[in-house]
Image (cartoon, rainbow, N blue to C red):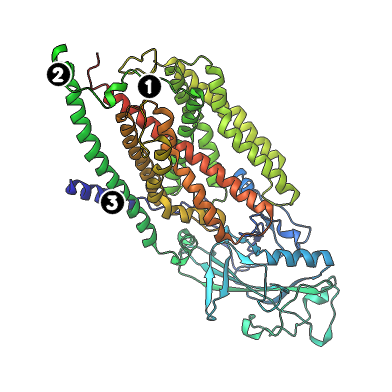
Amino acid sequence: MRSFAAKASVAAVAFLRTCHGFYVPGVKPHEFLPGEEVPMKVNSLTSIHTQLPKDYYRLPFCRPTGGPKMASENLGEFLTGNKIQNSAYSINMLREVFCQVLCQVTLTPIEAKSLATHIKYGYHNNWIIDNLPGASVGLTGTGRHQTHYAGGFPIGFITQDSPEAFVYNHVNIILEYHNPEGKEGHRVVGFAVEPMSINHHYAGGFQWDGMSSDGFTKPLDTCIANQHADRNNIGDFQRVRPGENIIYTYDVMWRYSETAWASRWDVYLSEDHMVPAQVHWYSITNSILVVLFLSLLVVSILVRNLRRDIAGYNAMASLTDEEKEEEAEESGWKLVHADVFRPPQNWPMAYCIMVGSGVQIGVSGFVTILLAAVGFLSPARRGSLMTSVLVFYMLCGCLAGYVSSRLYKSFRGRQWQLCTLFTATGFPGLCFFTFIFFNTILAFFRSTASVPFLDLVIVAAMWCCVSIPLVFLGAYFGYKAETISFPTVTSTIARAIPEQTTFMKPIAAILSAGMVPFAAAYVELFFIMTSLWMDQFYYVFGFTLGVYVILLITVSEVTVLLCYYQLCFENHRWWWFTFLTSGSIAGYTFVYSAFWFKSLEASRMLITYLLYFGYMFLISSALFLVTGSMGALVSLWFVRKIFSTIKVD
């Protein structure tokens, strides 16, 4: 047995080594000629403390000539709150820029209050050049430069001494370029921003009205000619106060890099190795050990006990009536053979709907993670992951209809149209109307996370015109298929269930069963939560795929083991028991998310709490359906298997 476990663990690790996510570019690299314009775009302002992305030009920043214009975006970008627009910054390939004046903004009382509030809530700029997000260059507590590659850079800061806000009105734009062999132009392979707060003044006491061309050419006392701005030379920070004239400036620095264009995203995805790969290996090793331990436990208990039970029951069946009377009274799971396949006593239609919905979510999630693991859904393609989740979920609607209809037919249900309709509209309807509710609130906050009406119509059309018909199509084939056959005949009158011990009561088993699968996945869950709510890149989908499969295996093994003991204690109501037992990990996930919420240091805005716990409830509900349906279907196979091996009078 030990050699088997060792071989299994080696095989699993060998497989996972092939599961690294890699970057499939998907776009043609652009070579910029010397002096050619390199456009810079601005995305929504984001804050992990409020979870409310805002339009960049809602704050008093410099606007481009002719006003901001939207870049082309896909459906996934709109759904994830991205709003990409052009900017006023002028950047040209290999052209150094020194303290270039961009514009001057005189703050009104409303603008000053709005800017200070956004600084207080920790909002960050998110700039993009050649599809690369701008990294943030700052100082650590020891004064050492440190670069963060996800989440953008802050729009300002508040000192610890006083609550006064200061805005970052100067940026050093640091661009890295690479010159591929045989190419005339250069490729952008790195983009970072070093923000600074400088209270600018013109030389000679010049006062600019913000309109005349003189302000763009007059020298500033706070800048040194032909030298890039340095933090050590800053005399006074730019305060945010009503009537304050804020002069926005920028430097552009070009640096050559040996980084190839195809691997320029590596440093973003690994956050410059801030989180060691060993942490993810620890996560997957922890999961493998849990599933191996469970597998050995299931094999040692179930196989041994079942072999003994089946041999004893079959030997009992071959005895004469006189010999049977001499034998001890039968006990165990065989006694419930006439009731074990009795349809659920409560809500059989709801059971079928939830199992079908869980299969739909589970399969679509597996396909999405698989494609991401092999590199087709890179973070470089903004919104691609969300779009893929929607598309695959809708295409898997046929599986939901097929599974729910076959189960409902085996329960001899008659309202098959109603069952199919609820399968097609139950969980999707909950998600859609929750999304509509939050979208309406976000629209009042003027957040870019509020999806435009046209995109809502597109999502609704995809649901009504694609997903629902596919569910009915799957249900049609499910009802046309043969009824699921059971190896025993169900009696007319249900058998009474004996009094259960405290530990074997269904509620105790349901509440405790989720601990083991949660323990197998909690480490990777931390990184997924960080990516979801802290604007971090997540790319180790190979590990996610491994943890997802291990989670389903663990859930199945725990559920089968508890189902066996329930039958041994002559409790034949196992349908809902197995679904709730395997789905109980969702409760642990939601409780964990409540504790993890402290990491966000969330604002006191009610909408932040509604968004976080509302969407975490939906995620936990989806996990409940996936794991619940997995445990229920595996238990159905297990129960059919063991009762088909015994002889029943």
Q: Position of residue 118 (x, y in %)?
A: 71, 63
Regarding mark 1 in the picture, which secondary structure is present there?
loop
Earlier along the polypeptide chain: callout 3 or callout 2? 3
Earlier along the polypeptide chain: callout 1 or callout 2? 2
Badge 2 crowding class, 10 Å Cα cut-off, few under 14, some 14 to 19, many 20 or more, is: few
Regarding mark 3 in the picture, which secondary structure is present there?
helix
Q: Which mark is residue 326?
A: 2
Q: Position of residue 564 (x, y in %)?
A: 31, 32
Q: Which mark is residue 14?
A: 3
Amino acid type, mark 3? Ala
Relative height, residue 520 to residue 460 (above, below): below
Amino acid type, mark 2? Glu
Task: Specify whether residue 374 is in view.
Answer: no
Q: Mark 1 — residue? A: 496
Of badges 3 and 2, nearer the viewer stands 2
Q: Position of residue 50 (x, y in %)?
A: 65, 57
